[in-house]
Amino acid sequence: MLLIQDEDAVRKLFPPGALEAVNSVGATRPHRVRLVEENDSLPLTVGGKIAPVDVEYEMYGTLNADKSNVVVIFHALSGDAHVAGWDMSAVETGRRWRLRKPGWWDEIVGPNKAIDTERWCVICVNALGSCYGTTGPSSINPATGKPYALSFPIVTVEDWVRLQVMLLDHLGIERVHAVIGGSLGGQQVIEFMMAFPDRTEKAIVLAASSKLSAQGLAFNAVGRHTIMNDPNFSDGDYYDRDVPGQGLAAARMLAHITYLSEIGMETKFGRRLQNKTEPDFDFGIEFEVESYLAYQGRSFVERFDANSYLYITRAMDYYDAAATHGGGNLTEACSRVTAESMVVSFSSDWLYPPNQCRELAIALSQFHRPVTYIDVPSSYGHDAFLVETEIVGRLVSDFLGREVADG
C-alpha cells in the first residue's frame, strides 16, 4: 500500500492533468474529528446512544472573516463527503475506486462553477452509520474490540443533522449561507431548516420531499431482504469473511431502477441485446439493460458496506418531517422555517415525484416566506439532480447569489 506521504507516486494514479485543472478544487483530503468522546455519548432519536463518534468531512474554499460564506452540502444514500476534486487519500484508505473519477458533484462545485469555491466555503459531512469515515456499523465497538455490525444502534435523519450541527459548532460556524441536498440529502436540508431554523439563510431541496412514499418504502424493504438473506450475511457479522455481495448487488440493482425513468431507460437501452444479434435463450445476460444493472451491482459491492445500506435505507424510511415537527401536519411543520427556500423537482422522478415536492413548496409558502418551486423537464428520472448539471447549476448559482427577499 502506498503511503499518502508519497504524494508524487499517488498523483501518477489519477488521470493526466486531473489535479491541475483550473476549474477543479484539485487534490483533496478528508478531515476527521472526534465529536463525541468514549467517556461521553451521543443520545439518539429513537433511543439508545453511541460513543465515541468520529465524523469525516471535506471542506473547499476559504472561510471569510465572519464565517458567513459557508454552504453545506448533504449527500444522498450511497454518497459521501467527497463532493469535488480528486481524493488523495484514496489509496491509503482503500477507496481505490475514487481514482477513476472526481467527487460526485464535481461539475457543480469548484472555482467559477455553480457553487463557486472562490466565493463560498463548501462543507460536506459523511452521515452517521455510513462506511466512509464517520462512525458506522463497520467501525470498531470499543466494548468488544470488533465491528459493531448489527449492534450499531438505529440512526435517523434527525441524528445526522444534529451531528452535522455539532460539527459546525466545533468549527465555530454559527450560521451558514445555505444548505443544499438532493434525494436523501434533500431530506436532510428539510430537517436542518425545520430543526435549526436560525442556522441558515437559504435552503435548496432537490428531488426530495417530506417523506418517502409507500412505493419507496417497498423498494427499500426488498433491498434489505436481499441483503439479509444472502448466505454470507451471517447476521451482519461478516467483516472477517466473505461479504454478502450477491444480496448487496441485487439491492443496488433494484434501487437503481428507481433512480431512472421509463422513458430514459427506453432511450438508453430499449430492448437491444448485449453484444449479439440474436438471443441465446438462456438465463444469462441477454439485454443491454441487464448488463448495465449487473455492472451497477458489482461496482457498488466494491465500495459500500451492506450493513450501512441497511441502516441508511431505514433512516430514509423513518423520516417524516410532518410527524417530527408538525404533529402530522406538514404546513404546521413548515411554520418553523425562516430560511428562503427553493424546491426543485424533476418531471420523470417517481421516487420523489413532482406532486410531493410541490406539496412541500406550497406548505412552505403559507407563512409569507420566500419560496421558489421549479419542476425541471427531464427524462433522467430521480438521478436528474446529479445528471442535469447545466440547469441545476444555473438554478443553484442564481439562488445562492440572490439577496434574501423581504418576508
Image (tube, grey):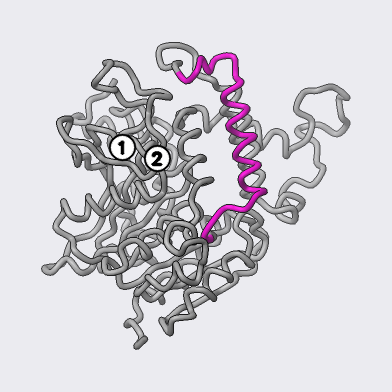
Kind of residue at disc 2: Val
Residue 393 x %, y %: 45, 67
Query: Which of the two residues, 360 or 343, is positioned nearer the viewer here?
Result: 360
Quadrant where the N terminus is found in the figure: top left
| Secondary structure that dominates the magenta span | helix
Above/below status of 22 relative to 247: below
Residue 17 seen anywhere in this rendered image of the structure:
no
Label 2 Cα crowd, 10 Å radius (few <14 / some 14-19 / many 20+): many
Q: Work out which residue is located at the far top of the displayed protein and give it.
A: 241
Q: Residue at x 74, y 56 (%)?
A: 263
- Residue 294 falls in image quadrant: top right
Residue 33 x %, y %: 19, 40
Query: Which of the two residues, 190 or 286, is positioned nearer the viewer here?
Result: 190
Q: Is residue 232 magenta?
A: yes
Residue 128 x %, y %: 35, 40
Q: In terms of secondary structure, where does tag 2 sit?
A: loop
Residue 91 x %, y %: 32, 29
Label 2 sits on residue: 155
Q: CA distance from mark 2 to mark 1?
A: 13 Å
Q: In terms of secondary structure, where does tag 1 sit?
A: loop
Q: Earlier in the sequence, mark 2 or mark 1?
A: 1
Q: Which residues are magenta?
A: 209-236
Kind of residue at disc 1: Thr
Above/below status of 46 relative to 248: below
Q: Residue at x 86, y 24 (%)?
A: 280
Above/below status of 390 relative to 5: below
Q: Is residue 198 magenta?
A: no
Q: Residue at x 16, y 54 (%)?
A: 171
Residue 294 seen anywhere in this rendered image of the structure:
yes
Label 1 sits on residue: 134
Q: Work out which residue is located at the far left of the displayed protein and give it.
A: 65
Horizontally, residue 176 falls left or right of residue 288, namely left
